[in-house]
Amino acid sequence: MWRQILALIVKELLMVLRDAKSRAVLIGPPLIQLVVFGYAASFDLNHVPIAVLNHDRSAASRALVAHFEGAPAFTLVATPANALRIDPLIDSRTVEMALVIDRRFSRDLLTHRPARVQLIVDGRNSNTALLALGYANSIISDFSLSWAAAHGGGAPPAVLVTRALYNPTLDSHWFFIPGIVALLTQVVTLLVVALSVAREREMGTFDQLLVTPMRPFEILLGKGLPGVLVGCFEATVIIAAAVWWFGVPLRGSLLTLYAGLVLFTVAVTGIGLMISALSLTQQQALLGAFLFMVPSIILSGFATPIANMPDWVQTLTLVNPMRFFLVIVRGVFLEGADFSSLASQYWPMALIGLVSLAAAAVLFRHRTG
Amino acid sequence: MNASLRRLSGLLRKEFLQIWRDPSSLAIAFLLPAVLLFLFGYGVSLDARGVPLAMVVENPDAASADFTAAFAHSPYFRPRHFRTIQRAEQALAKREVKGIVWLRSDFTRRALARPPAPIGVVVSGVDANDARLIEGYVQQAWAGWLASWARTHGRPPPLLVDVAPQVRFNAAVSSRNYLVPGLIAVIMTLTGALLTALVIAREWERGTMEALMVTRVRLAEILLAKLIPYFLLGMGGMAASVAIAEGLFAVPLRGSFWVLSAASALFMLAALGMGLLISSFARSQFVAGQIALIATFLPAFILSGFVFDIASMPAAARLITHVVAARYFVAILQSVFLAGDVWSVILPNGAALLLMAAIFLGLARAIARKRLD
Amino acid sequence: MRLEGVRREFRSGKRVVVALDGVTAEAPRGAVTGLIGPDGAGKTTLMRLVAGLLRPGGGGIEVLGLDVARDPLAVQQRLGYMPQRFGLYEDLSVRENLDLYADLQGLPPDERPARYATLLHMTGLAPFTARRAGRLSGGMKQKLGLACTLLRPPELLLLDEPTVGVDPVSRRELWQIIDDLTRNGRMTVLFSTAYLDEAGRCDSVWLIHEGRLLGAGPPAGFTAEMQGRSFFARAACNRRRLQAELAGLAGVIDTVIEGGRVRVVTATPAPPETAALAASLPRFSLAPAPPRFEDAFVARLRPEAPPAATAPVARAAAAEPAAAAEVISVSHLTRRFGTFTAVDDVSFAVARGEIFGLLGANGAGKSTTFRMLCGLLPPSSGRLRVAGFDLRHAAAPARARIGYMAQKFSLYGDLSVRQNLRFFSAAYGLANARQRERIDWATAEFGLQFALDATAGQLPLGFKQRLALACALMHEPDILFLDEPTSGVDPLARRDFWRRINDLAEAKVTVLVTTHFMEEAEYCDRLVIMAQGRVLSSGTPEAIKAVAKSPALPDPTMEDAFIATVLAAAPGEAA
């Protein structure tokens, strides 16, 4: 029995590797996505163009502007002469934010009265707007406190002492790149598995496989294991790239990570086999994989937190293996998490894997006759 | 009616009948957009709300209660109280809370006698974006508390600079308002490029293209007969998406409908041009689908500024975005929906779309041959 | 139409495949020219070149006095072309397809009603104008495709394999239509086919093989040169033994089993030296036979006598109980898909060592029956037994006793020949020395030594067929299932294939074969004719042909018998 399954696995792997087109599917898109996500996908702000309208022209206001110019998040691109010039700059998206310093800014500061500055932000991209406001607010607070300290204003009653665990510079690449491990592993595993049965059906070899003495269960195993192997291989490559190319710290143990990885690929393989059992042509299999993949990526917490979703959508994500693996991969990479703290992420994937494999086995039997 | 017009109308009639009778093209044109809009409208949100936050107040009193009240009443946080910082840190490690605000036992005493008293803020940096947003919110709460402290103790405000933020176009800073318009560009890429490439590949696969080629039909007629129906279908999908955006998600449409339609038409032409171009290389639905997804759908998703800010990308990535038609359309859409008819955005981006449409359609026409090789 | 040294190559990866190699020929105006050759001979490429869809890599093509390469549009104005699969839009109704092509061909609206009426009458499609093309039977699609190309009568009509997989009745009707069209001599027809027996219908024939023109001229010319070289041999012994004996004679270039007799073709116009045979075989007789087109084809491919037939396939004779005479039994087998009954109350039995055929057109229900027998599909009702088991529920050892060769010789095209052999032998549980031994056997027996590392998908069709059979035989099965085993391969590969099958049958392997090739049915010991899911007749080829025997047709072909059987079963539907 094992010899037959082994033969099937070897054959599957050979088929994936010998055909130029399927090799391309395994290598091309993942590479493109790794590069694109690795570099382009980021919520960090760099060089956000801003405008400054300084009505005050005092040493104090110039110091405030200098604080903005010194921040890497902002680039000063315009100094409009009057307030009327601001709106066109924002409307045309030449600047993302405008800082307007009141005429009495330094006078108010010196008399310990609230000195007014205005921040006008383009809300068309709400995330950038919020982050820019946050940066600007902290720059202004810093300025405020240092000015007070320099002019004998005394210390404020309390200050924030902020510490970011796991990712001290809050670099969002550290968030996305481990996520790519999950994303690409899912894509590749699903494509390998979902297309493999459909392709044999189209070529007519599937019938030939079914009339051999192999049992459906053995065929299922022989079709599924290559998906797990290819998925783990793909993940290993991306993990290596994350550590050595992108410099993301890997703080936890590889054992913890790979335990999750294997469970994840098994769960995805089960789903892929279900899709495979349901579809008669590669076209249908591809469509089925796509229909599963898009929602599962969007609702995984890959780019946006699950906590922000409405409750019913959050319940829906419980059947998505990727949501659990994302926690594991990020936990192991950044937090150095161990088995015990991730236990609640392991068993749901194991359950999804078991249920989907069983369902695939039933569908398989049903569909083959 | 002259012969050319009759041929064209015959082809068009065929195309419409096929669209009408083939559920898969209608599904790609209408069902898929609806599903994607629902997923994004409901599932994707960058607005933190109800973030679990650990509050460690070692010595509760009036001053600390005043500080924590700012969190209790905020829709953004769901504060959980812990006695010791160790417990809170354990909760953070177990991912039960996203951050910690820590007021030590000597908080009020130090604030009065030996300012400044440190307020410990710990965030989990795993999700950097979330962490930044938490930091921003905490900072606002702190600033509010400082002002009220100064009032109650009759002192000058410690933060002398008073910031008056003003968010243009999207006062509630709702991420849905900016994601949904951008999504329309992604959806139209799907109908324009993917659907067109698929239906032409299908004609090759079924051998009907070969039969068309040997009739006296001209190449321009075949191309037009594909352009017109899928243009209309794409505009239909667009109209449906706008209706969902307006009706279900209450995204404002501040610009004029005509500008929106004109920009959509230009983008649709560019997307169709891509679709035709792909179909002249790929003659099986499988390959056409793959190319369309990689060459149009993914860039429209990632490099269009639909989710990720183009200005913040590295220079090389920024350069590539210039050849992504969706980039120009997303810029127009976000302005037309949220800001209005801002001509300084619409005109340059519209011109870019026009150029891209002309290039793609021109290339598609130049490459197409009434031959199989 | 004139072709002058036409050459065309295709690039696939790094390899260059020569599809046509210097074809020079001429087709007379107002006649039917048959473009005849096996799959992969270059027929479709030639058709597309003539239609201006491809540019020749060398040489020139002149159609209706015009150079196709220079002015394809002008040529396309004047020709009609029906590609393989007929070029119909399956989502559109019969009427809508006609409307579309009428618009494309510029048929004025006022001429349409009359033209539609004529064509619909001619094709018998008048009752079905509202039906979608996808729901038509193969024969009806073929006729609709033809009607669409004829809307505005073209001067040159190109038909690419219009008769593939179409039942013989529809095939005959199509030829009737073509005869009517060309009778007044205004239309020239180029007709491609892989069926060699259609040559006789043509006024002129281009015989093409592996991109080369083997001969051109009226079909009578081909058969004339075979005059006095074809014979029928009979003897009161096993016909397979008779064939083997005859094939060994000097000067014999071809032997084919045809029902109860064997057709013998010699290299020179003289009967073979059979004195020795007459002595050893009881009641041996040899009579001259009318030459067939296929004889000429084989003679051209194989001018010399082939090497003497090899010994029967060496096979470890399993000690089978002699009583198990009935290996496959099927009774009242029915299979429904929704409301459609694909197989309707089918019963038959196959004895050990017998070659049994299921003959029918595409969609007759033979593949469904076949799949049920292999356990790939559960029957809706009825009973079936293969080697005493229902394979659907049988344990793995039962399935190890059957060999299966799927349609289109489906193998793993991306794997090499060696990898295919290795995989299938392992799938059947062979290992270590035994596996190596069988792979060596298959390599030697099927002549695969030089192709072991070639990718299976890129092999020529004949090789693929051999490899598929080798894979099915790796585990020495008792029962062999063959689905359309020779469709599209050239006559030599077909002969080679049947020689092996005959050897297997001699070694008491039971063979079940489906086919839509009428001639192939002649190889079977017994067969059933299926149409619309039902068995119309069953028996030996001789018995089935006897139905069509009449004074006007003393020696009917299997096709005659098939048509007679179908007409007798449903006189109304075939009209």
Image (spheres, coloured by chain):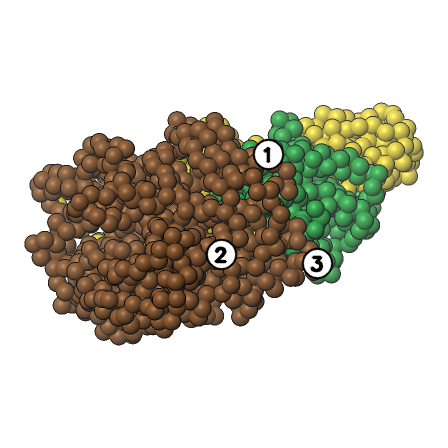
Q: Which chain is yellow?
A: B
Q: Chain of mark 2?
A: C
Where does label 3 land, which residue?
C432
Where does label 2 land, which residue?
C503
- Residue A10, image x and y in percent? 65, 55
Q: Quadrant of residue C170?
A: top left
Instruction: Tell me the CA gap for discs 1 and 2.
Output: 31 Å
Residue in the image at 39% along x and 37% along y: C365
Determine which of the numbered discs, if any, sits on residue B96 in the image.
none
- Residue C226, image x and y in percent? 25, 67
Q: Amino acid at mark 2?
A: Asp
- Residue C460, image x and y in percent? 44, 63
Q: Amino acid at mark 1?
A: His
Q: Judging from the image, what secondary structure is the residue with disc 3 in? A: helix
Residue in the image at 68% along x and 28% along y: B75
Q: Which chain is green?
A: A
The answer to which of marks 1 and 3 sits earlier in the sequence is 1
Q: Looking at the picture, does residue C333 appear above or below residue B197?
A: above
Q: Colour of chain C?
A: brown
Question: Does residue C298 appear in this view?
Answer: no
Residue in the image at 47% along x and 34% along y: C330
